[in-house]
Image (spheres, grey):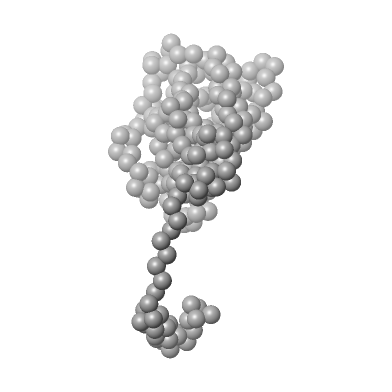
Amino acid sequence: MLNQHQFRQVVLDTETTGINPKEGHKIIEIGCVELINRRLTHNRFHVYLNPEREIDAGAIEVHGITNQFLLDKPKFKDVVDDFMAFTQGAELIIHNAPFDVGFLNHEISLLENDSRTIETNSTVFDTLAFARKKHPGARNSLDALCKRYEIDNSHRELHGALLDAEILAEVYLQMTGGQASLLDDNLHSGEDRQQVIERLSHDRPPLNIIYCSDEEQTAHQQRLAQISKAAGICLWEQ
């Protein structure tokens, strides 16, 4: 059970039989990893699914999942309740969210008497849209982002929903400013932010203030004058 200071996110990826659900393509793998206050937990949701149809040859080249492998796997209708329960109330982190959300909503729409949607169950953060704004004109595939943020994805020879979700979690954290701070870590205890600040300030010894000498102050002013003369303006003097 989350307390009021905890923020839950679920990083999600899917693999499918093809590109377009409107052409009858289905989901064959769902992989999710959990972040609490921007820290990875050991909580996972991972299933392979029997799509009850053939997988496109081009899709098999991407993810390596075969029709034979999926024959004894559950169907989407068998896992949808567990999936919706796992993601309920979380912010979903997805790379190219319209693709995965479109497939998931299509699968749900095929179920009898089920009016749920991903958007009414969770909020969605599209890392591809975010990356395009942050790095306009650059390549923003998951592999390109791994290279940009120096994240090792050498074990990613084929796409896989769980593996890609784990990699995307690392990319998301780096792209949006890194993991939670020490201050956020202390919030897990139930203290509010001001209580943590006051406690950390109380426990820390007073800072040792070292004042500059007259010689250092003179040298500093001379340096500012040099900058002002060279540039025509020195902001530090203002």
Give residue 131's position: percent from left, percent from top.
49, 49
Could you say which is closer to the camera, residue 173 or residue 48? 173
Give residue 167's position: percent from left, percent from top.
40, 37
Quick check: 85 left or right of 131? Answer: right
Would residue 80 be seen by someone viewing this image from the given angle?
A: no
Could you say which is closer to the camera, residue 59 or residue 13? 13
Quadrant of the rendering where the N terminus is positioned? top right
Residue occupying the point 46% across, 44% down? 182
Could you say which is closer to the camera, residue 229 or residue 205? 205
Q: Give the image quarter of residue 169.
A: top left
Give residue 57's position: percent from left, percent from top.
40, 27
Quick check: 10 left or right of 167? Answer: right
Check the image and name the residue furthest to the left. 154
- Relative vertical location of residue 7 with respect to residue 79 in this rendering, above or below: below
Quick check: 183 left or right of 217? Answer: right
Residue occupying the point 43% across, 43% down? 171
